[in-house]
Amino acid sequence: MLSDYQRYRLYEMAPGLSIWGTLVLCIALSFWQPLWMMYFIIVFDVYWVLRVVYFSFYLFVSWRRFRRAVKVKWFTRLQKEFPAWEEKVNVVFLPLYNEEWLVINATLQALLKSSYPSAKLYVVISGEARQKKYWRQLQQTILEHYNGSFADLIFYTHPSSLPDEIPGKGSNIHFAEQEFKAYADAKGWNYKNIIISVFDIDTVAHPEYLAHLTYMYLKHPRPERSSFQPVTLYNNNLWESPAILRVMAFGTSFWMLFSLARLDNLVTFSSHSMSFQAVLDAGGHAKQIVSEDSRIFFQCWLRYSGDYEVTPLYVPVSMDTVRDVSMWKSLTNLYFQQRRWAWGSENIPYLLWQFKKHPEIAWWKKLVILFHEWEGKWSWAVVPILITLLGRLPLWVAGGSIRQSTLFFNTPHVLEILMTLALVGLVSSVIMSMLILPVPPSGTRHHHYLIMLLQWALLPVSLIFFSAIPCLDAVTHLLFGRYLGFNVSIKKRIA
């Protein structure tokens, strides 16, 4: 009989075993049965072409909704359709560690310039006791610039070495939420009327974001049973970032656009908003894991017996790429950021463990949510390697008799045709990347736009070294029980 620890460890090993098992089996078949592998690669590439078409379709749908949403004067619409909008309390949580003032100031400036009245906005800024000296100086700087600009500026200091938590964004937010509960109680607020937005410190909200959020919250029949996920654009410092960072930033933004149009696969990611009632019912953002942004959705989904969803918001928030002072440091930051995101595979054992505790949830609902989470990590690690490397391996190692077969001669041509068809996804991405470019800095010349087009030639490199390998790294750590802590993504801008 397995102990609880042993059973949970098996669940943790499962994602890594499925990914490594696929890769090892593909290599073995390439040597042992290359014809089987050729058939598999052709079938898989056909499937992937269909997935690319599917992705491009939903990307286009989401793009149209995005373009319409950003043109609406949402605060005017909010006032007109919901006269009692002031009953709702908007609170923005900004956890930080040692980020530079240039980044923090841009975030607060965006909140100040919002169409939603800043005088009705509560801003919670939570720093770390581990950075006490810097945090104290920063509080003073914030007060000098923004005292009296919002309904209230609330500062919390997250103590170090609290029990049952790891240092990071999740534990910082969890502490701030518990402290804010006491603040809300003192005000006599109804938790269902409190809308919290948990932002990364570099999140620059669109001027209409908070108004749009409040509008959608009031329009939703049961807003406490939904999270609200905006479009995330990584373009605050896009023009000054290296090309690979830009390609990966666009890829993340496009994936979020695609996901917003596919509600069956939508999970909270990075900056998001939700009812404070749901936060408290779910126990707050997780304080002992890395991927607290997606975990809070699963916590709520389980707490409400599968009766929880994510509502898409097509008004965007903008964030930074992980640019640093040098190319090497920037690429290192990118690798560790992608590995941290891939560490979201820790949600798979969590779900497997929790399912037994919730017999009231239909088995097919559990299967669907588990499949989406697992397949996403599997595809993240396996597909780039399968398409770019392993798909050609049986052609390189096949023996003499197989080299005389019709399949051997035709496979390269078939793969070439399929990959040409798959370029529709790349073309869609290139076009859309030019459409969502932020305003360039002064002095930008025409050839910089050409570079923005040519940079997509780096896509195969970025998919292998800054997508698949970081994901493999993460699931391998989980496989062997070598747990990752929260690494802070360094983000620097040119003043």
Image (cartoon, rainbow, N blue to C red):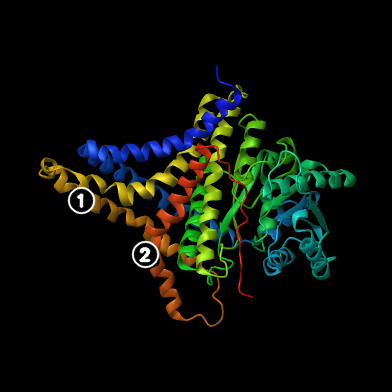
Residue 214 located left or right of residue 440: right
User: Local crowd at mark 2 within 10 Å, few (<14), some, or many (≥20)?
Assistant: few
Up the image or down, 128 lies above or below 265; here it is below
Front residue of 81/413: it is: 413
Task: Quote the CA–CA distance across marks 2 and 1.
Answer: 21 Å
Report the disc number at residue 412: 1
Mark 2 lies on residue: 457
Up the image or down, 371 lies above or below 487; here it is above
User: Local crowd at mark 1 within 10 Å, few (<14), some, or many (≥20)?
Assistant: some
Front residue of 37/234: it is: 37
Tell me where residue 391 appears, x and y as whole percent.
Answer: 28, 47
* Quadrant in which the N terminus is drawn: top right
Residue 460 located left or right of residue 273: left
Tell me where residue 208 appears, x and y as whole percent.
Answer: 66, 61
Answer yes or no: do the residues labelled 2 and 1 have beta carbons within 8 Å? Answer: no
User: Which kind of residue does numbered mark 1 sit on?
Assistant: Pro
* Quadrant in which the C terminus is drawn: bottom right
Of all residues, the one furthest to the right in this rendering is 186
Residue found at x 37% / y 58%: 460
Residue 432 located left or right of residue 124: left
